[in-house]
Image: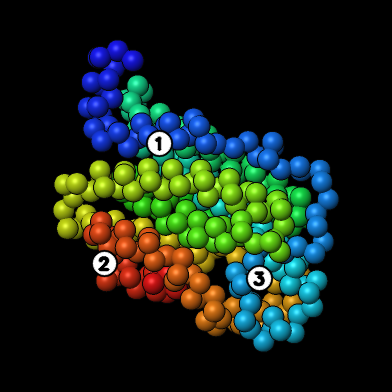
Amino acid sequence: MTATAVEFRQQIDPDGTLERLLESAATLSYDPDQEIDWDAPLDPTKYGLNPEWSTLYGTRLWDEMSEEQRIALTRHEVGSIMSTGIWFEMILQQMVLRDQYCGVYGGSEFQFALTEIADECRHSLMFAKTCSKMGVPHYKPKRHVRELARGLKTLAGGEIAYGGILVAEEILDVMQRDWLRGENVLHEVRTTSKIHVVEEARHMKFARHEIREHLKDASPLRRKASAAFIAGAAKFVVESMVSDEVYANVGLDRERAIAEAKANTHHHNLMRMSCVHLMDFLSEAGLLTPYAMRLYRSVHML
């Protein structure tokens, strides 16, 4: 690299964070089609996710279910989470592309942003293939959420865009770290979780970097407004992760299952645990306002 090129990189990435992310992407990335045999039969004894992460684990209904129903439920639940992930990754890609529109093409920020988009395309295809292999529907968020998200992906920029990205990825990260270690979890889910955890670690670091950069000179009013939008996005993502339809699709009483899932303190505690580091960062960034905290508490993230 010439001296002029080095100086240019240092100007736009003074601490080298983005350059290190690019180097990591070049040396530690996966091809799901090489890691997963999509034609191999599923192990009928394996869960879709660790049973402890099921929305019904610890409830009376869970105790009444057969082992076959529990396995089927966790496969539908992880399929719903993956489908929600695809939906949000499509939003993410549009927000990042818009943020980088006419960016500095030779800069590490622009180049890593496009690298992240390429990763997200592979992740979405990976999740879609996993859902198809498990034979579960491709669940979608409720219509009003999908329509509200059109506004988010069209208008959100700066710290709101990257904050929305961060909260969605942080929640999945903790879940998937457990799934990839679960010996009673499908090989396909463990492998997709490993790929996602490794590659999303870079994306989350990039999101934190961008949030800090965008908030450097932000006014208190802007921080409050951004905090509210990010918390609102988080609420919709969490509420959409496990579709209400999964329960009927595995032969459970839909209304009873929804009621017991909503009252499941075990699952609420897992959600709070998965968001500890996220809440620490949001607080440090000035994005954990009283109103935002109320929204996070409403979906047990705080």
Q: Are marks 1 and 2 in contact (CB under 8 Å)?
A: no
Q: Earlier in the sequence, mark 1 or mark 3?
A: 1
Element type at mark 1: helix
Disc sitting over residue 21 in the figure: 1
Q: Secondary structure at mark 3?
A: helix
Q: Earlier in the sequence, mark 1 or mark 2?
A: 1
Pinpoint residue 145: horizontal percent, then vertical percent.
51, 60
Amino acid type, label 3: Pro
Residue 290 vertical placement versus 233 (above, below): below
Residue 89 image position (x, y, % from top left): 52, 46
> Which badge, 3 or 2, comes first in the chain's sequence?
3
- The kind of residue tagged 1 is Leu
Q: Residue at x 42, y 65 (%)?
A: 275
Marker disc for residue 289 = 2
The residue pinned by badge 3 equals 51
Amino acid at dot 2: Thr
Graded by Cα atoms within 10 Å as few (under 14), some (14 to 19) or many (20 or more), the crowding at tag 2 reads: some
- Give coordinates of residue 281: x percent, y percent: 31, 58
Quarter of the image for residue 39 reads top right
The spot of residue 272 in percent (x, y) is 44, 71
Q: Furthest-bottom residue in view?
A: 60
Q: Quadrant of residue 300?
A: bottom left
Mark sitting on residue 201: none
On the picture, is 27 further left or further right than 20? right
Q: Determine the residue positioned at 27% across, 20% down.
A: 6
The crowding category of the residue bearing disc 1, from other C-alpha atoms within 10 Å (few below 14, some 14 to 19, many at least 20), is many
Q: Is residue 102 positioned above or below 177 on the image?
A: above
SS label for mark 2? loop
Query: Badge 3, how many Cα within 10 Å: few under 14, some, many 20+?
Result: many
What's the CA distance linking mark 3 and mark 2?
34 Å
Q: Image point 63% across, 77% down: which residue?
A: 57
